[in-house]
Image: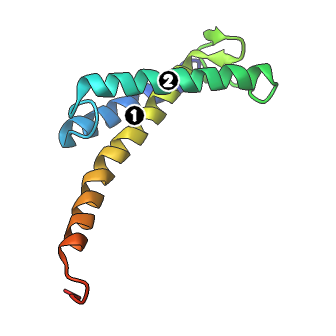
Amino acid sequence: MPGTYLAALVLSIAGVAVLDARHRLFFWRSPWRAAVVMVVGLAFFLVWDVVGVHLGIFFIGTTGLLTGVLLAPDVPLEELFFLALLCWTTMDLVGFVRPRLARRLDRGADRTPGDRS
């Protein structure tokens, strides 16, 4: 059914947005910085896709799940949403892991060399 993949991507992006908002991981922590990171990430991966298509590495397979809208030859509309999901999920993961890692490293720095507590 055309548009099924796009619907699944939009639903997934909504889920990532809810997690982001709930835990203030990326966009809800610093919206302007997050927007810049997202735009740069999307631009990088879209260029990557276009180069891959030009080199014959990437292509659209046969499926009835896509809308049929193309951003460029062999770059479907769904690719933009997939890349947004990829970038946002990655940055939420960084936003989740970074403070926990920093706290763990700070606790380790507070110990004396012979302390095993």
Q: The N terminus lies in which quarter of the figure?
A: top right
Position of residue 80 measured from the top left corner of the image (x, y, whole percent): 52, 21
Q: Separation of disc 2 and disc 1 at Cα? A: 10 Å
Can residue 4 be seen from the camera position used here?
no
Is residue 86 toward the left or the right of residue 15 in the image?
Answer: right
Above or below: residue 6 compared with residue 15: above
Inspect the image, locate mark 2, and give the three-letter code of the amino acid beneath it: Leu
- Secondary structure under tag 2 reads helix
Question: On residue 114, which mark appears?
Answer: none
Q: Which residue is mark 2?
A: 42
Q: Which class describes the residues within 10 Å of circle 1: few (<14), some (14-19), or many (20+)?
A: many
Rendered position, 73 above or below 93: above
Q: Is residue 87 visible?
A: yes
Q: Position of residue 52 (x, y in %)?
A: 73, 26
- Single out the residue that lies furthest toward the front: 113
> Which residue is identified by label 1?
88
Q: Position of residue 17 (x, y in %)?
A: 30, 32
